[in-house]
Amino acid sequence: MNADLEREFGDFVEARSYALFRTALALTGHRQQAEDLLQTVLAKAVRHWGRIRTGNPEAYLRTALYRQQTSWWRSLRRSREVSTEQVPETRTSRDDTAIVDLNLALRQALARLAPKHRAVLVLRYFEDRPDGEIAQILGCTESTVRSQAMRALARLRVLCPDLDLLGTKEKTNR
């Protein structure tokens, strides 16, 4: 852009920016968002000023404001911040060391289970297989799979009582 066009654009912005800002403020409802909207449109307009200036540049920029705002409304990536009187409470983060301890205790308890019990639990809860498929893999009936799973879980609760506490805490946090 040459110096004359740059100066002409600067003069136009100086003369009409207040009116354009009012339009942007009416579109957004928030001062900071209106400033962002106007700045975005002006930054795009400066590149094409040589073409825009010959027609009705203010009408062109108002249309650009409407279209840019609509584009922002439609964009899923753009998050909108809403001012509130009170900052919402944030959830406290879980203690990662407690989770590590629980995982270690669970591994030790699983190691103490009978091989068939451990196999049923792994196939059902880790691999998410249906009872019929587990029965076929283990060479037993579906009712045996269900009873083995029930017994394995009962034994696991005895060997690792912290699992019941975890379930109780999660139910109270919901």
Image (cartoon, rainbow, N blue to C red):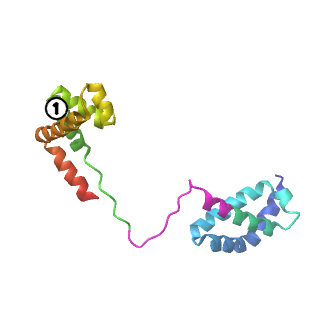
Q: Could you tell me which residue is drawn at 58 percent across and 70 percent down?
A: 31
Question: Is residue 133 placed above or below 66 in the rendered structure?
Answer: above
Question: Is residue 120 placed above or below 3 in the rendered structure?
Answer: above
Q: Quadrant of the C terminus?
A: bottom left
Question: Is residue 107 placed above or below 154 in the rendered structure?
Answer: above
Find residue 72 and report its horizontal and vertical position in percent.
62, 60
Question: Badge 1: how crowded within 10 Å, few (<14), some, or many (20+)?
Answer: some
Asked if residue 104 is among those painted magenta in the image, a careful observer would answer no
Q: Residue furthest left?
A: 158
Residue closer to the observer: 77 or 35:
77
Find residue 80 and report its horizontal and vertical position in percent.
53, 62
Look at mark 1 in the image and give the residue it sits on. Answer: 108
Query: Magenta residues?
Result: 68-86
Q: Would residue 127 appear left or right of 155 to someone viewing this image?
A: right
Q: Would residue 123 appear left or right of 157 to someone viewing this image?
A: right
Find residue 3 and report its horizontal and vertical position in percent.
83, 55
Q: Is residue 35 visible to the viewer in this orientation of the structure?
A: yes
